[in-house]
Amino acid sequence: MPYGVLFGWGGFWVLGIALLILFSRYVIPMLSIGLSRISRSSSMERNKRTDVRNIQEFLPKSIDFDPARYINLKKGIFLGLNENRKPHFLNIPMETNAPHLQVIGTTGAYKGVALGLMGAQFLERGEAVFFFDPKNDEWAPHVLSSAAKRCGKQFYFINLNAPNGA
């Protein structure tokens, strides 16, 4: 095969890749913005506040409720209040073991508060709770310690962030 044909096909291949990159970088976002402007909201849309990048705008400035008054292990694990300020429960039958959990959110979205609250309820169900927090949450150790005392369980706190080592 002559080198001119080979380089010609190679040039077209490189040009195609470059056009694909430019198209995906500039044209697709413009099409997405245009389509979002002309599309109508669906009646199936439950809650429009779903973008985690600006969740702070929708979170309360302070929490003024006591989660302990909503805890009812017969209904399930109390997760928090929904947008209508009604309690929301995760129904886990008492005869089953607790699942593994992962809570994801931005800084300041009360992930540690939610995990501490869930951990305290799992302790009350008789589950073993291991709580790892590399950012040193100040609230969760107190909640888990008092829940362990109420349930007659041992509580161990290991602070890996201590100034002089663990």
Image: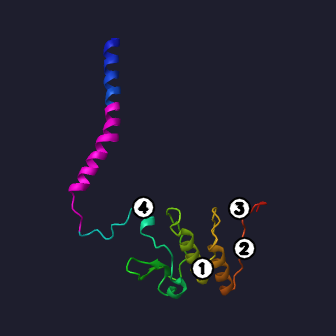
Instruction: Using the numbered discs, state the Cα–Cα distance from disc 4 to disc 2 in whole angstroms.
Output: 36 Å
Asked whether the viewer can see residue 99, the reply is: yes
Residue type marked 4: Asn
Vertical order, 144 against 25 (above or below): below
Q: Mark 2 highlights which residue? A: 156
Please tell me which residue is depicted at 57% across the width and 81% down the height of the picture. Answer: 121
Instruction: Using the numbered discs, state the Cα–Cα distance from disc 3 to disc 4 in whole angstroms.
Output: 29 Å
In the drawing, does residue 148 fall left or right of residue 93?
A: right
Sequence order check: which comes first, mark 3 or mark 4?
Answer: 4
What residue range appears in magenta? Answer: 17-42
Q: Mark 1 highlights which residue? A: 120
Label of residue 54 in the image:
4
Instruction: Using the numbered discs, state the Cα–Cα distance from disc 2 to disc 3 in whole angstroms.
Output: 15 Å
Q: Secondary structure at mark 2?
A: loop
Which part of the image, by quadrant, shows the N terminus? Answer: top left
Position of residue 44 measured from the top left corner of the image (x, y, whole percent): 26, 69
Position of residue 125 measured from the top left corner of the image (x, y, whole percent): 58, 83
Residue type marked 1: Ala
Please tell me which residue is depicted at 71% across the width and 71% down the height of the picture. Answer: 157
